[in-house]
Amino acid sequence: MKISERMDGEAIDRVISKLGDFGKFQIRAYVLTCLPIVVIALGVMNIVFIHYALPFRCALPDMPNDTYESQGEWHDAMVNASYVLDPLALDGKDHCLLNIPPNSSSATNVTSTEKCDRWVFDRSMMAETVQSEFNFVCEKRPRETVAQIASTGGELVGGIFAGYFADRFGRKPVFLISIILDAIFGTAAAFAPEHHSFAFLRFMIGFSIGGTFGAGFTLIMEMVGSSKRMLAGVLVEYFWIVGAMSTAGFAYLATNWRHLLLVSSVPLFGIIPFFWLIDESPRWLLASNDKKKRNEGKKLLERMAEVNGRHLSEKDLEVLDVQGDEVEKREEGLLRMFKSPKLLLSLFIVTLNWFSVSIMYGGLSLNSGKLPGNVYVNFLLISAVEIPAYTLLFTIDKLGRKGPHITYMVVGGLSLLCTVPVDLYAPHDAPSTRWVYVGLNVVGKLGVTAAYGLIVIWAAEVFPTVTRSSMFAISGFFGRCGAMLAPVIVNEARFEGPVGDSIPLVIMGIISVTTGLLALVLPDTANVPLPETIEDAENLYSKRSQSSGDNSSKWRPICQDTQ
């Protein structure tokens, strides 16, 4: 076989297209791969409720049965007398200091002020959270931020290892083993006796999730033909939305953070039979330098043809019968990747945008627990808006990747910046102000969610197969760096005052607008075959004027279904 006939993106896409871009075989594999995402989404988004900040105050001294709820007029009088006034606080009260009245033996009739070491919590929304059980309030409040960072920090580290292992050992084993680890550590975290072990187990949960996302998404994207990549990339998000929206219902029913962790962890043990139910990525097998794996890839395509009712000819198999020295080794591909200015530019812009959407997505999700009103309703709205957000992605094959992504980032960022005039000039106690404030957050979540879904698809399309999982992991690494910053921005970038609660939103809004505009330099990959080699990926820049503008060019999708 001549080198010019070696396997490339068009050859694989052409064969998969002949077998059916999204036939019965792929649909079955797709659904089985996406089902665990429902439970994983529940495990990721439950952070809003297990870390929900319950309203609190200092417990009255010498009153072991003190409660946040009023026990009568006498109780209200004692509580009011115990408050230390703070003119900068929204309610005018300091919840970390306590007024101690003079006792009968005191020589002076002077009230003293002390730091309180016991608190009572308003448990009307949640019976028990990490904050209330471990007393993450006042001076200990940063410990809760650290626990939240631990989870995303684990995703960061896990994503690095998973990307390398997925390229080396396959997408399927990394995906499934990561889910089992998530189940083990999630269940263990529900029984954590103190905050140190809890933070460590949250780190390990994040480590597991990091492998699940990268390997799982790559697996489903490499299973379908190029004409169905966008569909595959969007539909998986609806599985995520089901899990995210169900979080509010399970949290409402569980009311205890330990029970909620069990609900989101134990069902994942059901993944074990999937080792025999789902297949490895045919693209990964065929791009391998191991002849045995390439033969497995061809057998997988033969089975795909049989299930889809298509015919795979000997000529098709000959095209895929690539000798080892004609396949670019992944290690060599990774080194060449870092020597390519064009692909380094792609990596930089994709990474920067992934970083930004991760800050905003995580930040707005966490911030839903701090919005005025009912936390369950607010979270449901913030989650439900992802349905139209991802539905917008069905337009990107016609509109391209670039224009919609920039629009989503800019519109989402500007809506968050608009919260400042609302804080400054609208009456805080008015119901209309609350809905306007929540509405701006919902619009921001709409924009960032659409941008998030698009940048993940874009990232899978702009990098070649030989390094795709590794590049996906690198971009995801910095995305998780952004996710690590989200709780810091939401919890710590606040101060008492008229616009104090809007500061996190302003920070996220500025980041969104500026990084979104930088995506102007990326090539548009709409309707272009997945690049298999470094050269294919570099050619995206030389062909972008054709691919983004003239869909009748030779770079139109070559993977249309054929009978």
Image (cartoon, rainbow, N blue to C red):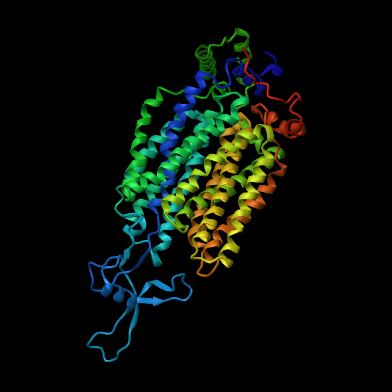
Report whether 335 appears left or right of 384.
right
Work out whether 225 lies above or below 87. Answer: above
Q: Examine the image and state in which quarter residue 82 appears.
A: bottom left
Quadrant for the N terminus, please: top right
Q: Examine the image and state in which quarter residue 16 appears.
A: top right
Report whether 5 appears left or right of 22.
right
The residue at 44%/57% (across/down) is 373
Work out whether 352 lies above or below 165. Answer: below
Q: Nearer the viewer, residue 75 or 50?
A: 75
Total numbered labels: 0
Image x and y of residue 177, in percent: 41, 33
Residue lying at the far bottom in this picture: please name it.
107
The residue at 44%/48% (across/down) is 151
Can residue 144 be seen here? The reply is yes
Work out whether 136 lies above or below 222. Answer: below
Image x and y of residue 532, in percent: 64, 27
Q: Nearer the viewer, residue 395 or 43?
A: 395
Can residue 322 be seen here? The reply is no
The residue at 47%/22% (across/down) is 28
Image x and y of residue 120, in percent: 31, 65
Quadrant for the C terminus, please: top right
